Amino acid sequence: MKSTDAPIADLGVITATSTPSIKITSIGAALGSLRLDVSEIATSWGAQAARTSATVRVCAPDEDSLTLAWLAGSQALLAAGYDPSSCSSEGALGLWWGTSRPPFAEGPSHSYLAAALSLPADAPGMLLSGSPHSGMDAFLTALDSIAAGTVSRALVVASDAPLPGTGTACERFTGSGAAAFLLEPAGDDLMADRADSLGQRAQTKTPSMPLVRWRAGASAPVLDRYRPEGQMMIADLYDQRLFREEILLPAVAAVGKALDTARQASEAKAGIDSWILPDPDGRLGRSAAKRLGARRALAESLFSTAGDTGAAACLLGLALVLGGAGDDIGDAKHITSEEGRITPESSDVEAIGTIAYGGGRASGIVVERPAVNVEQEPHSIPGAIGVRAAITQARKASYSEVLRSRDQLVAMSEPIPMGLPPGSAGFVRGTNEVLRCQGGQCAACGWVSIPPTIHPTCVNCGGTDLDIIALDRSGVVHTFVVNQTMPAPFTAPLPLVVIDLDSGSRIMVQGTADSAADLGIGQRTQLVLRRYALERGAPVYGFKACPETPIRQHPADHASQIPAPQVTGDDALKHESADTISGIAIQAVSNSSNEEIT
């Protein structure tokens, strides 16, 4: 009889390998904007609600894995001071994105995200998908590309928004989220960091960045959780005990022990200090930690707050820990003296092991970071403040609202099709400038015509010499209207907002539904990437307006300064017309529901 302590497949001897020293320069994180109490799911199906305060974070109707990836990636780039206008092929920044559920099953998912992040057209990278392991696949592939010299910097984004089957057990555990990391070679900084004392770092307030040091992995041909071709929802595991005892726990333990052994054999002469582990049901993480000799795993509060975020889960946990988020950060090693300053002891470095699992594969990395005084330096890595804010920025939603958001509760109606199919010339030609938030600036008068493909000549003076420029993504509300009734597939309330951008140009976009009640003339606002519609099976993306928060400012805001157009008096009103809507996707919305929004 097979022992429950042994894996189904013989994993053999797993050996961890050291990686070229690569530092994590900045981080970002995002979670679905809806928060659902887990207890409400049980009561909705007539079951007795468990005594739990756990919640899951769910995407709003206009969010998905791509919009979450954009938000997390934007935060990481902004925190690192990334300037799209200074990019070139030499020393290029690449994009590696991992998600089990890309917006297109087959289509331009990666290029859409790269454009929305204002990356150059020749930016290298890769989209990895197919299982919850894809987030770690993206991270490891980016490490290889930096080590090979393909890129000097890599933006790694792991995002997911799994769709659980209604009434299933996994519905109570499934969330949505994203994590982003900007990676660079450590170079000579590594030696300087090792030579510098902790006391000196505390005085200069420039702590060294976390370093990726080791990696390990193992795989076995086992059928665990899967989603067949043509099926949108994920189902429960057939045999939970089998998955727990003979698949996940042995694989995680084998990889974890390999990483721990490798660090003990290094110059550190010490094992892993703390772990971030897979936790698909809220209990397996702690069980896996015990097998590795730890009391519990770091970032356990992430699961009780957000649920299992699929391909983003473990890397999101790493981002939260590096950013100092979560009540269990206290389990990490923090060394302080009576004066509150950082003091060296037997080790001035904490080693964090992070392991991801999915599709029969387990892979892990070891990240070393300097011991940090939480009271004095809670945000020792760029992007930490935004990561902390991702946990709290949510709106409580009912179970029925979540089902509608996931298109699992659909009213019987006949949706109004868009005037332009997503594959038509207007969309194809305009998608790039919509995602990059671009306008055409007239060389003669400075007027910005939006979008350029719709207005190849200046709408102010008729000039033909237009320069494509990146628009600011923040400004002030000039005026707005909130539509309280909308035809399917759109939902009310639906704000339409005219914004005076900080650079001087004026655009009209949709607003997010959550901002409808709080809109006001003169209010500071910003543009965020959202999904406008799912048309003929294709997601249509564009920017929407929402109240400004500093952590959500996009690096493109700092990439260019657009001079204000020379327009006064009644001529200014011309810039508010419906044909100046920012982007093809937004114009199509206006055309398809004109009677409702006039």
Image: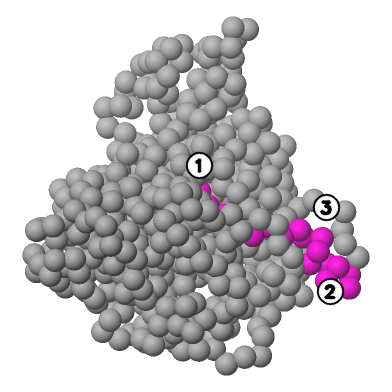
Residues at marks 2 and 1, CA–CA distance in whole angstroms: 36 Å
The residue that disc 2 covers is 45
Position of residue 235 measured from the top left corner of the image (x, y, whole percent): 68, 75
Residue 493 picture quarter: bottom right
Disc 3 residue type (three-letter): Thr
Give the residue displayed 66% in from the left and 31% down from the top.
331
Q: Earlier in the sequence, mark 2 or mark 3?
A: 2
Give the residue drawn at x 23%, y 65%: 449
The amino acid type of the residue labelled 1 equals Gly
Q: Which residues are magenta?
A: 28-47
Please rate how many residues cluster around mark 1, counting C-alpha atoms within 10 Å: few if below 14, some from 14 to 19, many from 20. Answer: many
* Colour mapping: one colour
- Name the secondary structure under disc 1: helix
Q: Which residue is mark 1?
A: 386
Q: Where residue 534 sits in the image (x, y, percent)?
A: 48, 79
Secondary structure beneath dot 2 equals loop
Of discs 2 and 1, which sits in the foreground?
Answer: 1
Mark 3 falls on what kind of element?
A: loop
Disc on the earlier residue, 1 or 3: 3
Residue receiving disc 3: 52
Q: Nearer the viewer, residue 261 or 274?
A: 274
